[in-house]
Image (tube, helix red, strand yellow):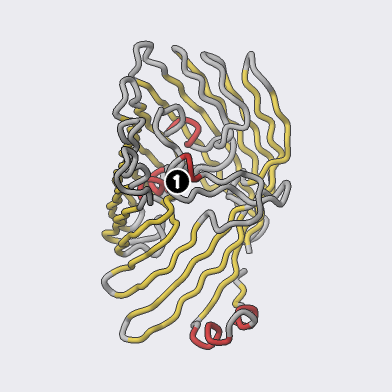
Amino acid sequence: MKKYVPVLLAGFTANLAIAQSSVTLFGVVDAAINRYSVDGGTTVTRLGSGGLAASRIGFRGLEDLGGGLAAGFWLESEFAADSGTGGTTNTNNQATGTTPANQGLTFNRRSTVSLLGPWGELRLGRDYVPTFWNFAVFDPFAMQGAASASNLLFAGTSGPSVNVVRNSNSIQYLYNAPHPAGAQGLYGQLQYALGENPSGTATASDGKYYGFRAGYATGPFNGAIAYSKTNNLANKDFTLTNGGMSWNFGFATLMASYTVAQTGLPNSRNSSYLLGATIPLGVGYIPVSLIKTKRNNAAQANAEQLAIGYVHNLSKRTAVYTTYARVNNHNGAAFSVGGSAPIAGVANAKATGIDLGIRHSF
C-alpha cells in the first residue's frame, strides 16, 4: 500500500507541498528467526532482520516540470526489525568513512535527487552501484538472508568492500531504467563517485569510483553486463566485473551469472558463477541456487553454496518464508552464511543457515 503524504510534508514547508506532484511513503518490515552454524566453529540462534527483503522506510517524490521534464527525490533508510536500530553508512567509499552500526536512522540505502526526461535521468547522491544490480536481479534470493549470493560472490576478496553495494557522492546517468528488473529494451547506467580526499596526498584518489551497466530486456529475457573500479592505494585498486541473464519459461524463471572480483595484489582474484531458478508454486514460489567460487591463490581455495527456500504470499503485501543454505569450503576457503556473516567461517568447514520469517511491505 502506498500512502501519499503532501499534508505531512506541508508541515515542513508549504512550498514543497504545493509544487510536489506526489510524495510516497513506503517501506518493508522483515524479521526472521535465524539459526547459523559452522562445523568446528560456533552456532548462533537469533531474531534477525531482512531474511527476504531488507527492512526499510523511505520517501520518494516526483514533480512534473513540464515539457517532458521532471524532478525527483528518493530518501530511504534501513533499520533492523529485531531491534529498531538504524544501519551503517559510508561517507567517502573508504573504510575511514564507515559509520558505526546500531545507530539512529540514516538514509543509508539511498539519498538522491534527480532530473528526468526523454533522454534519461541525471541522478546525484548515495545510490546503488551498477555491478550490484547484476548480483541482486540474477539471484533467486535477491542478495538477502541465509542464502544471499554475497556469501560467496564478493566475500573473501582482499579489496575494499564498503562500496560493493552502494556509493556515496555519486554522479550518474541512467537510460531507460524505471527499475533494474523491470526495464524493457536497451537500458544502462553510468556512475562516477568521489572519494573527497585532500589533493597532494598519496591517497588523494582513494574512494574514487567508476562503473557502468548495460543490458537488454525483451519479453521473458533479461541480460546485463557491468564493471566497476574503486581506487585504493593499499590494494592497488579494486575491480568487479559481472554479467547475468534470466529467462521466464512460465513454469520457472532460470538465472545465471558470472563474477570476477580482484585487486592489484597477488592472489586476490575471486571468480564465481551462480545458477538459480524461481519456481512458482500455488500462491508462492520456490527459490533455488548453486554458487561456486574459486580464488587464484596457491591452494586454489574454493567453495560452493547450495540453497533452497519457499515464499508463501498471504497477500500482495505480506509473506511468510523459509530458507536453507549450506556452504562447503575446500583448500583453505572459509566462507560463511547469512549475507552479513553473523558468524565467521572456518577453513575447510561446512556452514549452514536457516531462516524462518515474515515480510510485510507498505
Could you tell me residue 355's position as x and y percent? 65, 37
Residue nearest the observer in this picture, 97 or 88: 97
Tell me where residue 119 sits by quadrant. bottom left
Q: Amino acid at mark 1?
A: Val
| Image quadrant where residue 57 sits | bottom right
Q: Residue at x 64, y 40 (%)?
A: 322
Return the residue nearer the eye: 206 or 344: 206
Residue neighbourhood size for the residue with mark 1, other residues' Cα within 10 Å, grouped as few (<14), some (14–19), many (≥20): some
Determine the residue positioned at 69% across, 24% down: 43
249 to 257, vertically: above or below: below
Residue 323 drawn above or below residue 122: above
Which quadrant of the figure has residue 356?
Answer: top right
- Tell me the residue at 50%/74% (across/down): 61
Q: Is residue 100 left or right of residue 172?
A: right
What residue is shown with label 1?
A: 165
The answer to whether 156 appears left or right of 145 in the picture is left
Residue closer to the observer: 246 or 279 = 246
Q: Give percent across and percent down for residue 110.
A: 49, 58
Task: Point out the image quarter for the N terminus.
Answer: bottom right
Q: Is residue 168 visible?
A: yes
